[in-house]
Amino acid sequence: MARYTGPSCRLCRREGKKLFLKGERCYTDKCAVTRRQSLPGQHGKGRKKASEYGTQLRAKQSARRYYGVLEGQFAQYFDMAARQPGVTGENLLRILESRLDNVVYRLGFASSRKEARQLVLHRHFTVNGRRVNIPSYLLRPGDVVAAHEQLKGSDKIKAITEAHGSRPVPAWLDVDRENLTGRVIALPNRDEVDFDVEEHLIVELYSKN
């Protein structure tokens, strides 16, 4: 399955906001969005105001790139959200937030979602005591995520947890940094998702199809 392998900062500049794809770099003055306000490309400074469709597309692309999800999988998540009771846009964000790679990142066990995805793929985390190597695994309230014993003793995870020990953990998660475990208390409400996105634009975009 194809995945974007180009410069991560280019994606942030294209969306005009921080997507926190580079871990610690995104919190410093080296962030490309802070240093270069224009869009990427030769004609980035001269692009015209986006149309209604363009605005909706940018909302979808921002969410997809923020969570590191491919186009087809994002469409599947939208269909899943549309079938659930409640507000479709909010359901979509809950599904994206409940991905295992996102939860590992939110717990502070990885510096970025990309790194969290790699750690999960390498079987460094368990869910309810069982190793899971699927980054898109959807967690439910009550699930316990823990670093495998082999990872707990590594210098890499120690450096990550020390660097991100002050990062706030969402209220819908409970973390034990000493034992490198976390528990999903509940799926997040809309006001508990700190990502700057207008999810109703994504709903409008898919409603046209």
Image (cartoon, rainbow, N blue to C red):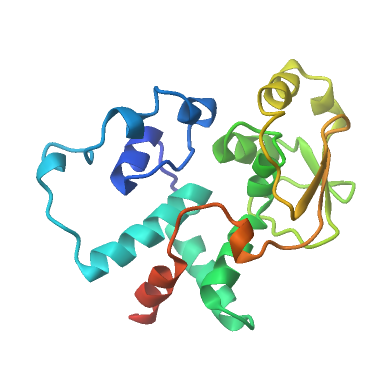
Residue at image position (40%, 61%) is 60
Q: Is residue 68 visible?
A: no
- Front-most of residues 178 and 127: 178
Residue 9 lies, with reference to residue 174, above or below; the image says above
Image: 176 above or below 67 = above
x and y percent of residue 158 in the render?
75, 20
Residue drawn at x 86%, y 59% is 142
Looking at the image, the residue that sits furthest to the front is 191
Residue nearer the viewer, 16 or 152:
16
Q: How many marks?
A: 0
Q: Position of residue 79 (x, y in %)?
A: 53, 76
Residue 56 location, x and y as percent?
Answer: 32, 66
Picture layout, residue 195 above or below residue 131: below
Whole-percent x, y for residue 95 in the image: 62, 64
**Occupied quadrant, residue 157:** top right
Residue located at (88% from left, 51% from top): 128
Say which of 195 and 122 sits in front. Answer: 195
Along the horizontal axis of the image, is 208 left or right of 195? left
- Look at 37% across and 44% down and name the residue there: 17
Of the 4 image quadrants, the one containing the C terminus is bottom left
- Whether residue 13 is visible here, answered yes or no, is yes
Q: Can you tell which quarter of the image residue 5 is in?
A: top left
